[in-house]
Image (tube, coloured by chain):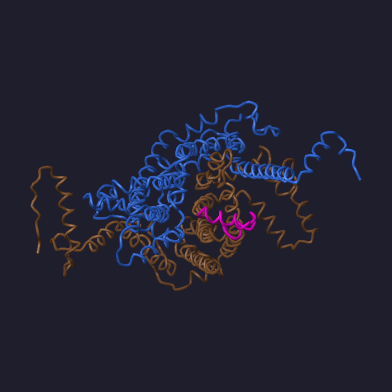
Amino acid sequence: MSEEIKVTTKSPSENDLVQRNDKDIIQTEIVSGDNKKTHRKRVRMSLTHRRMIVGYVFILPWLIGFFMFYVRSVILAGRFSMSLMDMDANAGGYTLKFIGLENYIKAFREHATFKQVLTTSLTNMLVDVPLITFFSLFMAILLNKKFKGRAVFRAIFFLPIILNSGAISEMMALAQAMMNGGITPTASELSSSAGSGVLAFDIDYLISMFMNLGLPARFVNYLSSAVSRINEIISASGVQIIIFIAALQSIPGSMYEVAKIEGATGYETFWKVTFPMVMPHIITNVVYTIVDSFTDSAVVDLAHDTMFKTFNWGLGSAFTIISTIVTCAILGIVVFLLQKRTFYYN
Amino acid sequence: MKTTALKVPLFTKARDYLRDPLKKKIALNSLKEILITVLKYSILIGVSYVIVSPVIGMFVNSISSDADAYNPMMFILPKYPTLERYRLAILRLDYWETLTKTMLYSVTVTFLQLFICSMVGYGFARFKFPLKKLWFGCVIFTIIIPTHSIMLPLYVYFKQFDIFGIVSSLQGKTGLMGTVIPMYVLSLFACGLRSGLFIYIFNQFFRGLPKEIEEAAFVDGANMFYTYFRIMLVNAMPAVITVTVFSFVWQFNDVFYAKLFLMPDTTVISKRIASLQKFIANEDNILSITLQELYRDAGAILVIAPVVIVYLLLQKNFIEGVERSGIVG
């Protein structure tokens, strides 16, 4: 069965390559019957089979990690959330006592703040997602065109990706509050919450003006909450802008040419060409935004504190499981709704 | 009804000029263009200000002296700038030492991420094997699932971590808590900080490369690993740069994993900065919160400086890479 190819040339490394090459070519022709054994036994395999195995070798690290860390962790988290957990602080061993759904019931019925924190995070997210999506699309369109100083603006616009993470983002928020109203942060906080400061803008006046216009109160509330969160929205849309810019670049220029020849205005071109073409990426962005906003939401902090500060491991796990399920449900609904309206070019 | 303004020679001249419909159209168009340009730049500059202003604010704070801090009229330009904040912040952060350690840690993790994620991405992009779709779906799943939902199992796992008794024989006790090794292990198995996203980016990029390169390599006798290493990875430079920037910056700033694995403050600067304010308040007996904040801001500037420098150096390549790497499917 095994066919050794005689090595006659001098340099060993080159030989190796030549030898492999020859073998591959032969192997493509001879498809052996028993290819269950690995190459150790020198059983002949077709190229497709070899590529299959090499493919698995390539993804092997991830595959191990996925089972070791993700699958195992998800199952364990489920178990933790359904039991009373005791952990030995030094050795790290733990004991589980199965108590069924008690933790979940506790989370919803007894815990003082969980429901509130969850709903606040959810509503914040629901307000933010459309705003972030449209803001980043708008900015991507602006940044995609050629103009003077584009490189500088692009560098600035992607800065939030760097700065909006971890420890620094908290400090950024504080510095932001300071910049909104003079040097003393306490004074600025007071003035912005009162709605009238030396440097702060009088928001109440604007709100009452919109109300007097006869706009529905809900709409005005939405707008004002959106405007007051402009910092968060801008700093959360870095990656989204990148994705949209890449999407805009991938639209073939011929489509715009056709639109121009047919006499479409800029407005029509946007709605008939640009928007449908970036629609699939709107889904990507919405998914990314939802996941991202949940990653640093208050629910996570609450769960973390419940686990590592009050050592209520089971309840904390229940929090994470609930919020994960809620996130996935929202993702599912949103993707389902958007998918129906999406046009796929390819 | 003729207004007097129109009788001014300049205006009459303009009116005569605009009589010609073609010229009128040109004039209107150029006016429109100017307005649009003004609008565009005002939006861009406005938003840029919102993005940059906290950095400016922190920088201003970090160089203002006591007199400036208490001066309510001071805005943006301190009257008596000083470097005292930096001196103390550098001292109390053990800046150079902590920074070196953090850099070492972040760079190592970045290399691991690059190597492993590109490999996995290549595997998904170029090879056909059974269950490929399912596994790739699982990659997407790892992107979507919030990391916090698996934090406790990870914590427990690394607390007991003792493969073949190596850890306990070296340390005297099991577990890797209080070290940065858990992060290395996670990255080694492509489950580190947003590894799923990096796999996805690499997968998209490799799929976009022409197959002919590999075929040529194959005909010339390169084996598959050689092809990946010496040919595909070199061609994937835009994606490599994108992932490098993302991975390094996120790792450098990360506090979630640092908190979860109880990494020591002396090796993770992003964790250390959080306690700087209290530390300085206690150590140097600075009781005024306003002054404490100045030191904290100086510390923050020191922490973001290396990241911003890395970003600015790779910025041009990074943005090009993003455009070309087809983050987009």
Chain letter, colour blue in render: B
Q: In which quadrant will I find the N terminus of chain A? A: bottom left
- Residue at x-position 50% and y-position 53%: A243
Q: Position of residue B131 (x, y in %)?
A: 33, 67
Name the residue nearer the viewer: A258 or A333.
A258
Position of B329 relative to A238 (above/below): below
Q: Main secondary structure of the magenta part?
A: helix
Residue B319 within the magenta-colored segment of the rendering: no
Figure quadrant of residue B64: top right
- Residue at x-position 35% and y-position 44%: B108
Name the residue nearer the viewer: A84 or A29.
A29
Residue A253 within the magenta-colored segment of the rendering: yes
Chain letter, colour brown in render: A
Q: How many marks?
A: 0
Q: Position of residue A340 (x, y in %)?
A: 54, 69
Q: Position of residue B89 (x, y in %)?
A: 51, 33
- Magenta span of residues: A251-274
| Relative to A148, A86 lies left or right | left
Name the residue nearer the viewer: B214 or A65.
B214
Name the residue nearer the viewer: A312 or A62.
A62
Figure quadrant of residue A81: bottom left
- Residue at x-position 76% and y-position 61%: A215
- Residue at x-position 9% and y-position 49%: A7
Position of B3 relative to A336 (above/below): above
Q: Residue furthest right?
A: B1
Q: Do we see residue B276 in this rendering?
A: yes
Q: Position of residue B203 (x, y in %)?
A: 38, 55
| Relative to A57, A260 lies left or right | right
Q: Do we see residue A302 in this rendering?
A: no
